[in-house]
Amino acid sequence: MDKLIELASTLVSGAFIAVLAAWLTNRSRNRQDQQADLGALRVQADALTVAVTELQSAAAANRLLWEGSAERARSFLLAVLAFTGGAARARIAGGTDSLSGLAGLGQAAELLSWDRRATKQTVAYVREPLARAAAAAAPLMRYPDPAVVAATEQLLAACADVENTARLETALEAFGQAVRTATAPPLSWWARRRAVQAG
C-alpha cells in the first residue's frame, strides 16, 4: 500500500510538474511573441516618423525655394528683365515696336515657363517621402490596437495636406502618444490591483 501511495504521489507530482512546465513554456513563448510584436511596432512607427519628417523637410524646402514673397519678386524681376532684353534684341535687329514687344513677351514667357517647370519638379520631390510614409503606415493600419490605427489614419490624412504644418505636428504627436501607450510595459498584477483600489 505504501508503494501505491508513493507511486500515486510520484504520478501526481510528475503531472503537476508537467502542467507547470507547459504553462511556463507557453507563458514564456507568449511573452517573447509579445516582445517581438512590440519591437516590430517600434520599428514600423520609427519608419513612419522618419518618412513624415522627410516629407516635412521637402515641403519646407519647397516653400523656402519657390513660394516666398522674395522668390515671387525674383521671378517677376527676371520676367521684366527677359522682356526688356528680348525687346531690345528685336529692336537692334531692326524690328518694329510691336515685333519688339512680342519678342520681349516671348522671352518673358520662356523664362516663366522654365520657372514653372522647376517649381513642379521641386513639388515632385514631395511625392517620394509621401510614398514612403504611406508604405510605412501600411503595417500600422493592420495593428490590433485601434488607437494606433486611428492615429496612423489621422497622420496619413495630415500628410496629404502637408502645407498645414500645425495639423501635421498635432497628428504626429498623437501618433507618438498612441505608439508609446501601445508599447508601454503592462502593469503588474499588484499595480493593477492598487489602481483598481485607488480608483
Image: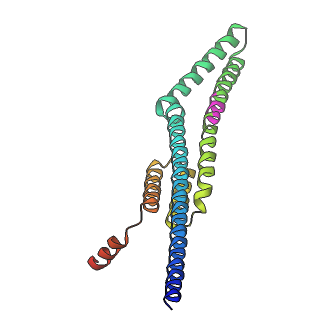
Which x, y percent locates residue 56?
51, 42
- Residue 23 sits inside the magenta stretch: no
Looking at the magenta stretch, what is its main secondary structure?
helix
Residue in front for this viewpoint, 42 or 178: 42
- For residue 104, above or below residue 150: above
- Residue 118 sits inside the magenta stretch: yes
The part of the chain drawn in magenta is 115-121
Q: Residue at x 53, y 88 (%)?
A: 4
Which x, y percent locates residue 155?
52, 55
Q: Residue at x 48, y 49 (%)?
A: 164
Kindly tell me whether residue 158 is visible in this rendering: no
Which x, y percent locates residue 6?
49, 84
- For residue 90, above or below residue 150: above
Residue in front for this viewpoint, 154 or 4: 4
- For residue 30, above or below residue 131: below
Q: Residue at x 53, y 84 (%)?
A: 7
Image quadrant of residue 107? Answer: top right
